[in-house]
Amino acid sequence: MPQVPVPEGLGVDSSVFSHVLSARGLDVLDDQLHKARKALATSPTEETIAEFSALEERYRLAGGYEVEGRLGRLADGLGFPQELFFAEVTSLSGGQRRRADLIRVLFQEPDVMVLDEPTNHLDRSAKLWLLDELANLRGALLVVSHDLRLLDRAISKVLYLRDATLREFKGNYSAFRAQLDADITRREKTSSAEEDRIAKMRAQADKWRHSTEAQARKAKILDRQVTKLQANRTEVIKRERKVRFNLPEPARAGAVVLRVGRLAVSYGEHRVLHDVDFAVDRGDRVVVIGRNGVGKSSLLRCLAGMQVPTRGTVETGYRVAIGYFAQEHEQIDLGASAIDNVDDAVLVRESDRRSLLGSFGLTGNTASQRAGSLSGGERARLSLAMLSAGQANLLVLDEPTNNLDPASVAAVGAMLAAWKGTIVAVSHDGPFVEALGPTHALHLPEERYDLWRDEYLDHVELR
């Protein structure tokens, strides 16, 4: 399961059902069986009867007639409404799409399962269910994740990749951290002792070098020993530095930053927002709360000017400049390099733009890399750098911490908590929302806007 989903799905048609069935090739068989059934009804010849019977037997042996029960169990476990199996893949929200992709890979029941950030967009109950499912997996599991609970409960080995070197640790994530810290401490002590020994040997060699001929020979022996020791020095593993991100001081906007009036959004016959009405004052921190599929991302796209609402108005106040962080990073030009995605209106020199990207962890060749080839975490960091270059004083943020490692999540929370602008955010990350210091909450689908209460944190992780 990739971190960034295939937009149209992988089935023979664009439905979620076909996408999920494609894990076992049942989408093709189901389509062939449907066509054979129509041909049989039109012309019940020996040939069409034989073809239909053969396809039906293949479908049965492949478990086609047990699909409904299996998919129902997986959907219930992950909190995926079963009626969405008949929806188009492109109509799903980010959280619904993540669940559909998880159902697909679990339905496949492979010998080896490779998952890239599987818990993104999942609420607490879905995560717990998935953890149990993965813990009972009969095959092998290779997972990239920043969800520490997943790493602790579902794995038996850690592969640690740093500075182009891969190291193996047995045990779960907690065991790995303890082993790594102990190994770093041991290496630091050993390296320090080696350094002291080399310094003493060099000092002794220098003392002997200009003395008698016998002592000069001893000095050469010591020189060779020093060279040998240096060639076999213990490698010191650098300790991870604390991550810090910064946003520039925002320009002062008017007293009322944003007004939303009777906003509605529909997709065909399906209406996700009915009558949203609220105002945001300068310095407010608004968190939009609601489960997946209730229109949170649609609302934020309307606020950012990326989508025209079906009805209603979005008005920005005096001297308001909007910065938008999209859940799927739609604001990034995937065909351009990372550095070319950074606005050069203020940072005219390339060196300044590279410096900005470096401050968000995009260093060296990564800055010149095509944005479409960046990982999910790197795209998130690029999006944050683009916000920093844009001089916005109103940030519209849709899941800004997805795909980020724990240290970066804490850094983003600290950055936004210290920033003096106005924020409207969607996030299911409780600690991040708490760090943000919300002033107001917009509840969807109730479309109720009120002052923030601490108990709303319990609702944040619901998806």
Image (cartoon, rainbow, N blue to C red):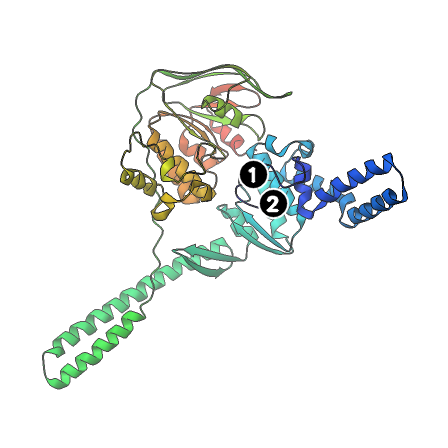
Q: Residues within 10 Å of mark 2 (few under 14, many from 20)?
A: many
Q: Residue furthest left?
A: 211
Rendered position, 219 above or below 122: below
Distance between the alpha carbons at the discs numbered 2 and 1: 9 Å
Amino acid type, mark 2: Leu
Rendered position, 223 above or below 442: below
> Percent from the top left, x then y, of residue 58?
79, 49
The local secondary structure at tag 1 comes to: loop
Does residue 413 appear anywhere in the picture?
no
Q: Residue furthest bottom?
A: 214
User: Residue at 60% of width from left, 32% of height from top?
Assistant: 90
Amino acid type, mark 1: Leu
| Mark found first going from the N terminus, 2 or 1 | 1
Q: Which residue is mark 2?
A: 130
The local secondary structure at tag 2 comes to: helix
Q: Is residue 12 left or right of residue 206?
A: right
Q: Quadrant of the C terminus?
A: top right
Q: Residues within 10 Å of mark 1 (few under 14, many from 20)?
A: many
User: Residue at 36% of width from left, 39% of height from top?
Assistant: 339
Does residue 400 appear anywhere in the picture?
yes
Q: Is residue 360 left or right of residue 299?
A: left
> Percent from the top left, x then y, of residue 210?
9, 78
Give 387 or 306, whichever is nearer the viewer.
Answer: 306
> Percent from the top left, x then y, of residue 167?
44, 60
Q: Which residue is mark 1?
A: 122
Rendered position, 201 above or below 150: below
**Residue 462 is drawn in which quadrant?**
top right
> Percent from the top left, x then y, of residue 238?
34, 56
